[in-house]
Amino acid sequence: MSGKPKEELKHHTEEASDRREIYLREGRTLSVEHAGSDDLVEVRSSSGQVELRIVLTEEGPVLQMESVRLRLKASEVVEIESKRVEIKATETLQLASGDEVKVDAEGCVRVNGKMIYLN
């Protein structure tokens, strides 16, 4: 052991691997690193599980989130525009009276389910 302070050794190790880490509350870590030709930004839980990952690729950013709950709230509209959208659930969705789900498609709309209710 060289006798260098722990902080100095940690900093040297991060430079060698081209990875930077910031320690957050609740044991989470934020890391930034190069992964081949991509840049990678990750937030991990105290157990090491990835909660948020952003991969900055040549084609554009790729976002991955794993959480207990995902909430999107907008005062006007939430828009999703994509070549393909897939939604998978294991439980039934209950809409409150007056709530609305609107689906517009230029092509076919396919609905698969054990039970499908229309009106």
Image: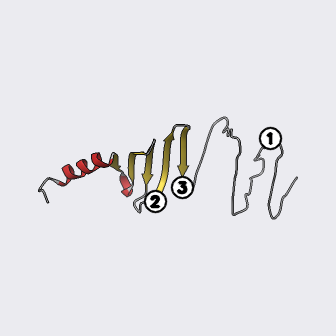
Identify the residue position indicated by label 1 in the image: 105
The circle drawn on residue 66 is 3
Say if mark 3 contacts mark 2, CB within 8 Å: yes
Q: Write the residue at 11% across / 56% down.
A: 3
Identify the mark nearer the N-term, 3 or 1. 3
Closer to us: 11 or 18: 18
Report how far apart the C-alphas of labels 3 and 1 lie in the structure.
28 Å
Q: Write the residue at 84% across / 45% down.
A: 108
Closer to us: 82 or 115: 82
Amino acid type of the residue tagged 2 in the rendering: Gln
Say if mark 3 contacts mark 1, CB within 8 Å: no
Q: Which residue appears farthest toward the right when viewing the image?
A: 119
Where is residue 18? Give x, y as percent.
33, 45
Where does the N terminus fall, quadrant-wise?
bottom left
Tag 3's secondary structure? loop
Locate residue 51 relative to residue 21 in the image: left or right: right
Identify the mark nearer the N-term, 3 or 2. 2
Residue 44: image quadrant is: bottom left
Report how far apart the C-alphas of labels 2 and 1 lie in the structure.
36 Å
Above or below, comparing residue 49 to residue 109 in the picture: below
The 10 Å Cα crowd at callout 1, few under 14, some 14 to 19, many 20 or more, is few
Tag 2's secondary structure? loop
Residue 77: image quadrant is: top right
